[in-house]
Image (cartoon, grey):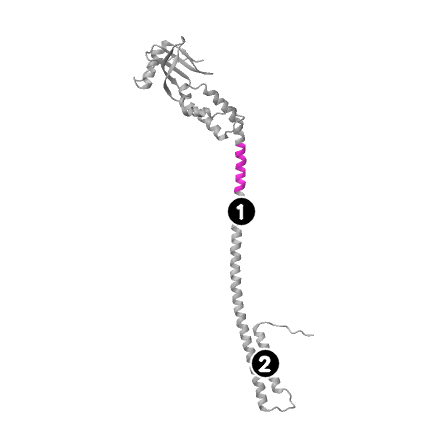
């Protein structure tokens, strides 16, 4: 049994309609061969067939026009959707790139965090010892340095018990480095200070003290008759009276203050 293949294209549909109209027209002309119809009846049948044919042709034209409009609309919709899909894919690719960059940066930050934690742990292990050593150095410093407001504030910031302090690690290091910096600056220069010195007989006398950094000091009274030397000790400076050195010490102080021209002065220095 042969099957008739259907073709839904507009051209095939028009051909089918035309064939149907032609067959209808032919049947109207040839039908009932044994009855002789009047001429007017044949004309009416022909007119009706032609009207149906024209109606079908109009319907086919409208369908073809609507099909063309639908086809154009669908093409526009497909173009719009294709562009939207391309934009979405580009946005997804960009987002993937940002995610990859973020992941890489996160890995870097985690590695840096690990290094910082390790460095912090090593610093926490040594800061207590440094604070104790800094506190021990304070007693060896000369009075002008210990009485300095900034230096004394740094010393006050040292915790009494490094193991129990709540100070941050950065604050503790600031105190220690500040003390060492101040001591280093004082040690790099010659200083003159006015102080009261207690003599061996219990008498207190006003003297000028010449400090050679933090390692040695020399004092003399206003008359140049009383003099002596000083050196850092475990509980502060240790002073020793040496009146014979008073004139040389007075001359050295005068040169430091700019009262006399520079010259060679021999001061008593004891080396252990």
The kind of secondary structure element at disc 2 is: helix
Residue 107 lies in the magenta stretch:
yes
Horizontal side of 123 relative to 199 (left or right) equals right
User: Where is residue 47 drawn, in percent x and y?
Assistant: 56, 85
Q: Nearer the viewer, residue 160 or 80?
A: 160
**For marks 1 and 2 on the same chain, the one whose residue lies earlier in the sequence:** 2
Q: Nearer the viewer, residue 125 or 104?
A: 125
Mark 1 Cα shell of 10 Å, populated few (<14), some (14-19), many (≥20): few
Magenta-drawn segment:
105-119
Residue 49 is covered by the magenta coloring: no
Q: Which corner quadrant holds the N terminus?
A: bottom right
Q: Residue at x 57, y 90 (%)?
A: 40
- Residue at x 57%, y 84% (from the top left corner): 48
Residue under label 1, please give it.
99
Q: Main secondary structure of the magenta part?
A: helix
Q: Work out whether 251 lies above or below 82.
A: above
Inspect this view and state whether residue 187 appears: no
For mark 1, give the secondary structure: helix
What residue sits 59% from the left and 78% below the top?
Answer: 17
> Residue 214, image x and y in percent?
42, 19
Give the residue at mark 2.
21
Residue 229 image point, x, y percent: 40, 13
Q: Label 2 crowding class (10 Å Cα cut-off): few <14, some 14-19, many 20+?
A: many
> What is the CA distance from the residue labelled 1 to the residue labelled 2?
69 Å
Q: Is residue 70 left or right of residue 237?
A: right
| Image coordinates for residue 203, horizontal then vertical, percent | 39, 10
Q: Quadrant of residue 24?
A: bottom right
The number of discs equals: 2
What number is the disc on residue 26? none
């Amino acid at each position: 049994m042969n099957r008739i293949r259907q073709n839904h294209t507009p051209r095939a549909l028009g051909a089918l309609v035309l064939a149907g109209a032609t067959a209808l027209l032919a049947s109207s002309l040839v039908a009932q061969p044994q009855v002789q119809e009047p001429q007017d009846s044949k004309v009416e049948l022909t007119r009706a067939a032609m009207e149906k044919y024209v109606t079908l042709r109009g319907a086919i034209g409208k369908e073809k026009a609507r099909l063309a409009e639908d086809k154009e609309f669908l093409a526009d919709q497909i173009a719009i959707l294709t562009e939207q899909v391309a934009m979405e894919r580009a946005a997804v690719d960009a987002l993937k790139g940002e995610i990859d960059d973020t992941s890489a940066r996160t890995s870097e930050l985690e590695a840096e965090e690990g290094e910082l934690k390790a460095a912090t742990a090593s610093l926490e292990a040594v800061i207590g010892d440094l604070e104790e050593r800094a506190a021990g150095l304070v007693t060896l410093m000369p009075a002008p340095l210990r009485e300095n407001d900034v230096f004394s504030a740094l010393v006050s910031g040292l915790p009494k018990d490094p193991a129990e302090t709540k100070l941050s690690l950065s604050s503790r290091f600031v105190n220690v480095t500040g003390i060492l910096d101040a001591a280093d600056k004082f040690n790099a220069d010659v200083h003159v200070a006015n102080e009261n010195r207690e003599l061996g007989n219990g008498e207190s006398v006003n003297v000028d003290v010449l400090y050679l950094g933090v390692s040695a000091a020399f004092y003399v009274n206003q008359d140049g008759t009383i003099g002596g030397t000083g050196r850092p000790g475990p509980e502060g400076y240790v002073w020793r009276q040496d009146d014979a050195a008073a004139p040389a010490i007075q001359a050295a102080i005068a040169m430091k203050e700019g009262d006399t021209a520079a010259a060679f002065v021999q001061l008593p220095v004891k080396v252990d």
